[in-house]
Image (cartoon, rainbow, N blue to C red):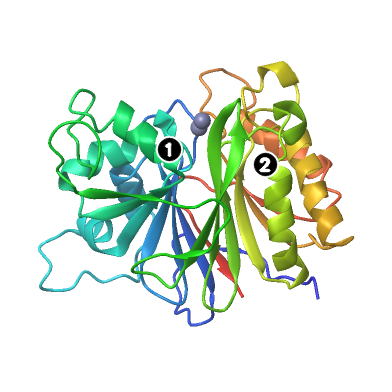
Amino acid sequence: MFRRKLAVLIGCLSFGVNAAGYDLVTLGSKGGIQDGNLTAFMLKSEQDDNYVMLDAGSIVNGLIVSEQKGAFSDIEVPEASPYTKVGYLLKERIKGYFISHAHLDHVAGMIISSPDDSNKPIYALSATNDDLQTNYFNWSAWPNFGNEGKGFKLSKYTYTDLPAAQWQAVTGTSLNVKAMPLSHSGGQSTAFLMKDTDGDVFAYFGDTGPDAVEKSDALNNVWSSLSEHVKNDKLKGIVIEVSFSNETPDKQLFGHLTPTWLLEELKTLEAKSGKGSLEGLDVVISHIKYSLKKGESPESIIKRQLEEANTLGVNFHFPQQGDTLSFAD
Ligand SMILES: [Zn+2]
Ligand SMILES: [Zn+2]
């Protein structure tokens, strides 16, 4: 019942896929400080051809690097299209932005590409959409490409507030989404649960601290929501952050996770879903910071600390910018 196929790192390979499941292209893998490679994932159900963005820290540069790595080698730009493949993907194939919170490392790519973007919805909890209007699309930081907020509204982007914890259809795709609040150093962030028409679920977590440190039950609520899909063997994969290694004291986490805290949180999901229920679950680690220091990279430290304590049997993945992961049914 709990057997799962491994996510296949297809990299520059591509093969005809008819089975249901999800494809995830990493447009940006870092939680800082590398402009051009900030948190952003393209997700699509294998049931249709269209993508959504899960956060938008790097968009055009992420598409360029991903195209160079062969992530879109099976996509043909229609002859009649005036666009390059990068342009075609951005303007025609990405059907909306899901923004977990308005920190710059999650929205910079969307803001910078907005003048040449196509009309799209921005899906978020209302507090995040309010932050985007107030802080960025306000004719001071940047022209107002939104349909609400200060001054003349260029209305390229339609702020679409998601009700917390309710499924809702995503226009232009075969997906439904459920947004759930997360606690991020006292501020609000968001987990987006995606479900296709087969009931296969993929979960994306924006920045979050552990419940115990945040004094919150936000992650606990997401685990409760996900546990039914784990029990039905329908949870195909998750993206979640580990920003710091275990050496970081709790009071310096600023709303982020360490390997130990992620595994503690995943144990809560296992406890709700049954012993051994997470064996083989694909867990994509995001938001590791680019390091300016010599010596072992934060990524290899975090990788080792996760693997050493991985008593749950989950499969951790550490995609680089441009990598594609396929989550088979
Ligand atoms: Zn961040
Ligand atoms: Zn943040």
Q: Are marks 1 and 2 in contact (CB under 8 Å)?
A: no
Left or right: residue 222 compared with residue 205: right
Q: Is residue 206 visible?
A: no
Q: Residue furthest right?
A: 275
Q: Is residue 208 above or below residue 235?
A: above
Q: Which residue is mark 1?
A: 128
Q: Residues within 10 Å of mark 2 (few under 14, many from 20)?
A: many
Mark 1 or mark 2, earlier in chain: 1
Q: Amino acid type of disc 2?
A: Ala
Q: Is residue 181 visible?
A: yes
Where residue 259 appears, as percent x and y from the top left, is 73, 36
Q: Is residue 151 above or below residue 292?
A: below
Label disc, if present, on residue 218 of the rendered structure? 2
Where residue 327 appears, as percent x and y from the top left, is 58, 66
Q: Amino acid type of disc 1?
A: Thr
Query: For residue 245, what is the image quadrant?
Result: top right
* Quadrant showing the C terminus: bottom right
* Quadrant showing the N terminus: bottom right
Query: For residue 247, what is the image quadrant?
Result: top right
Where residue 119 appears, as percent x and y from the top left, is 21, 55
Disc 1 to disc 2, C-alpha distance: 16 Å
Asked if disc 1 is less than 8 Å from ligand 2, the answer is no
Find numbered disc 2 in the image and state the secondary structure of the residue it sits on.
helix
